[in-house]
Amino acid sequence: AALVLGGFDINGPHLFTVYPHGSTDALPFATMGSGSLNAMAVFEAGYKDDMTKEEAMELVCRSIESGVYNDLGSGSNVDLCVITKDGAEYLRNYKFLQQKTYQRVHPVVYAKGTAPVIKEKVFDLSKAVTVTEGDAMDVS
């Protein structure tokens, strides 16, 4: 899916997926992104009709965790959005998964001799490059 769209109307909650070519699906659960196959596996194993809000939030959290832990491009935390008849609740950093175990000091300063120079060759670029002046590029 290129877009997952959720909402609530007089008929209850709805979840749709929209694909780049325009087709749509109405489903009880949906995933998208690079970790979507891992997340879908968790949904398929754990979804049941008439889940409580807490059960649904836990299932979504576990599915996102699966995507994050099994795909390098899937981020490092769990954000949830709970949509009910009363509105939407955004839960940023619902669960932070990959806390850094160190604190980097900036700038990093390496002691002289840390990386020994084995061979050095210096080029005089002024002899290899010809600079010509011209009209400025239009960047408007």
Image (tube, rainbow, N blue to C red):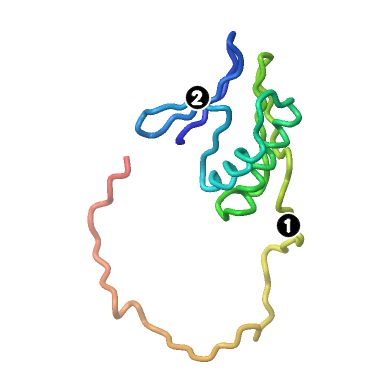
- Asked if 111 appears above or below 87 in the picture, the reply is below
Instruction: Report x, y in % for residue 2.
Output: 45, 35
Left or right: where 89 falls relative to 31: right
| Dot 1 and dot 2 residues touching (CB under 8 Å) | no
- Name the amino acid, label 1: Lys
Which sits in the foreground, 8 or 93? 8
Q: Nearer the viewer, residue 36 or 88?
A: 36
Mark sitting on residue 62 = none
As drawn, which residue projects farthest toward the bottom?
118
Residue at image location 73% in from the left, 38% down from the top: 94
- Mark 1 against mark 2, which lies toward the viewer? 2
Does residue 26 sit above or below 122 in this rendering? above
**In the image: residue 105, left or right of residue 21:** right
User: Tag 2: residue type?
Assistant: Ala
What's the mark number on residue 26? 2
Q: Within the image, what quadrant is residue 51 found in? A: top right
Q: Is residue 86 above or below residue 89?
A: above
Instruction: Give the image location of residue 126, x and y in percent.
Output: 33, 77
Which residue sits at x=72%, y=62%?
104
Element carrying mark 2: strand
**Residue 45 horizontal side relative to residue 36, left or right:** right
Q: Earlier in the sequence, mark 1 or mark 2?
A: 2
- How far separated are the C-alphas under marks 1 and 2? 39 Å
Q: Nearer the viewer, residue 39 or 117?
A: 39
Q: Secondary structure at mark 1?
A: loop
**Percent position (x, y) of residue 11?**
58, 10
> Where is the C terminus found, in terms of image quarters?
top left
What residue is disc 1 on? Answer: 100
Q: Residue at x 74, y 53 (%)?
A: 99
Q: Position of residue 40 (x, y in %)?
A: 57, 41
Label 2 crowding class (10 Å Cα cut-off): few <14, some 14-19, many 20+?
A: some
